[in-house]
Image (spheres, rainbow, N blue to C red):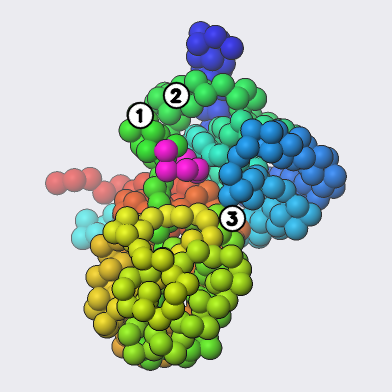
């Protein structure tokens, strides 16, 4: 496509999305749920078609020599397809946030003032190598009363279009406009530049992908962006931790999946338990192929740890690499996390109530956890049905963004003839 053709195509997509958003905003909950259930059933029914389409994308990815972490995110399996469908069904089972009224109170004048939850409008989602996002984003935007424009990465074009067909079918069965969810059909990168500057048609942009993509969107977008840049996540093993529990959590937080934004990248261990717990953990990590980089105290425990550099403490590896630091106390652990972390997800393992409360209060991240793995920082695991992304911003939505994060609030005022004196 030429630049002119791209501009015309995106203007058409934008106009259709804006028109559809007005219909979706006033759609009944039953109709939205009917569409979600129909999409889920279509995805389960078309499992073989989806896997066949995904194989084309995987074959192309191998030919292009894409990194293992990206291929992992690109891959659809029978389990991930079931998870996509289950996520949609869970969204259908959630309360509809649209129209919810809160904080209604009387003023001295006799009027009542409150807030009503309303859709954002048209949401543009830009993502790389994650075909499951097509279903998750479609479902969440639909239930929250929004229209969506989805621009997946070129590496997942066949998978995304196969899922898009299921989405259109579900919308049609519920008598909702198929243009409520539009998946961009071209892989031309110029589409992104158009999408993030269409102020007349797009109300918010959600980028999901690598740091380069998100930085570009943040710098060039002319509409608001919901985002996180890095997932530099920590687990701190406290001096008062249950050590078997800590081993299980620290293992899972790093090795359950390497290429996700909620995977632990730095392990912090209190000096009083380091000699007892680290040898076993190091053995587990080495058995699973994890390269270890540590501070001087950690390196002194074994020859199997390389010396960490200053850059390691703020690195998001998205790979089988882990930094380890031994700290003097809880204060030093919190200080390290707030200095080097990305305000994504951080966890403490401790049996001490006071330490847990301090960690929850003083660690400035969008998800803060006690005695569990950072891998739970996920919309599906939080009961949101799915997530549109994770936000480390402090305005509007923070943490996994589900239905509520895809709505806003407006003031409503109820009167009975009162006038201002």
In the foreground, 331 or 138:
331
On the image, numbered disc 3 is attached to which residue? 386
On the image, numbered disc 1 is attached to which residue? 220
- Per the rendering, the mark at residue 193 is 2
Q: Is 8 located above or below residue 239 in the figure?
A: above
In the foreground, 419 or 58:
58
Residue 213: which quarter of the image?
top left
What whole-number distance in Å separates the C-alpha atoms at marks 3 and 1? 27 Å
Secondary structure found at label 1: helix
Secondary structure found at label 3: loop
Q: Residue 113's x, y, as percent?
A: 31, 55
- The residue mark sitting in front, 3 or 1, is 1
Determine whether label 2 and label 1 are within 8 Å by CB. Answer: yes
Secondary structure found at label 2: helix
- Where does the magenta region start and end? 206-212
Q: Residues within 10 Å of mark 3 (few under 14, many from 20)?
A: many
- The residue mark sitting in front, 3 or 2, is 2
- Residue displayed at 57% across by 76% down: 284
């Amino acid at each position: 496509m030429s630049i002119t053709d791209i501009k015309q195509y995106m203007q058409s997509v934008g106009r259709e999305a804006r028109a559809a958003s007005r219909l979706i905003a006033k759609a009944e909950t039953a109709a939205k749920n009917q569409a979600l259930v129909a999409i889920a059933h279509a995805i389960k029914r078309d499992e073989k078609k989806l896997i066949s389409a995904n194989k084309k994308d995987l074959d192309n990815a191998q030919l292009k020599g894409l990194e293992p972490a990206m291929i992992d995110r690109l891959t659809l399996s029978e389990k991930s397809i079931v998870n996509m469908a289950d996520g949609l069904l869970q969204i259908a089972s959630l309360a509809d946030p649209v129209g919810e009224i809160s904080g209604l109170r009387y003023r001295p004048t006799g009027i009542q003032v409150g807030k009503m939850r309303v859709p954002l409008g048209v949401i543009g989602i830009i993502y790389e190598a994650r075909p499951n996002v097509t279903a998750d984003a479609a479902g969440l935007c639909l239930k929250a009363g929004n229209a969506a424009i989805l621009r997946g990465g070129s590496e997942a074009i066949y998978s995304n279009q196969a899922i898009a067909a299921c989405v259109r079918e579900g919308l049609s069965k519920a008598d909702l406009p198929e243009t409520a969810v539009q998946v961009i059909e071209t892989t031309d990168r110029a589409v992104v530049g158009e999408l993030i500057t269409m102020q007349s048609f797009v109300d918010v942009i959600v980028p999901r992908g690598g740091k380069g993509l998100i930085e570009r969107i943040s710098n060039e977008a002319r509409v608001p962006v919901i985002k996180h840049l890095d997932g530099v996540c920590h687990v701190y093993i406290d001096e008062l931790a249950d050590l078997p529990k800590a081993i299980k959590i620290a293992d899972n937080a790093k090795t359950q999946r390497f290429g996700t934004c909620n995977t632990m990248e730095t392990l912090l261990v209190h000096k009083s338990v380091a000699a007892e717990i680290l040898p076993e953990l190091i053995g587990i990590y080495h058995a699973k192929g994890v390269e270890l980089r540590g501070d001087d105290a950690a390196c002194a425990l074994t020859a199997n740890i390389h010396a960490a550099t200053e850059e390691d403490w703020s690195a998001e590896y998205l790979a089988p690499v882990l930094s380890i630091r031994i700290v003097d106390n809880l204060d030093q652990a919190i200080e390290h996390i707030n200095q080097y972390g990305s305000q994504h997800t951080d966890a403490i393992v401790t049996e001490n109530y006071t330490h847990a409360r301090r960690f929850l209060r003083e660690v400035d991240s969008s998800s803060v956890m006690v005695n569990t793995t950072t891998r739970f920082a996920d919309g599906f695991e939080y009961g949101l049905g799915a997530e549109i992304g994770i936000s480390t911003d402090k305005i509007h939505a923070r943490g996994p963004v589900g239905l509520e994060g895809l709505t806003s609030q407006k003031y409503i005022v109820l009167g009975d003839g009162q006038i201002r004196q």
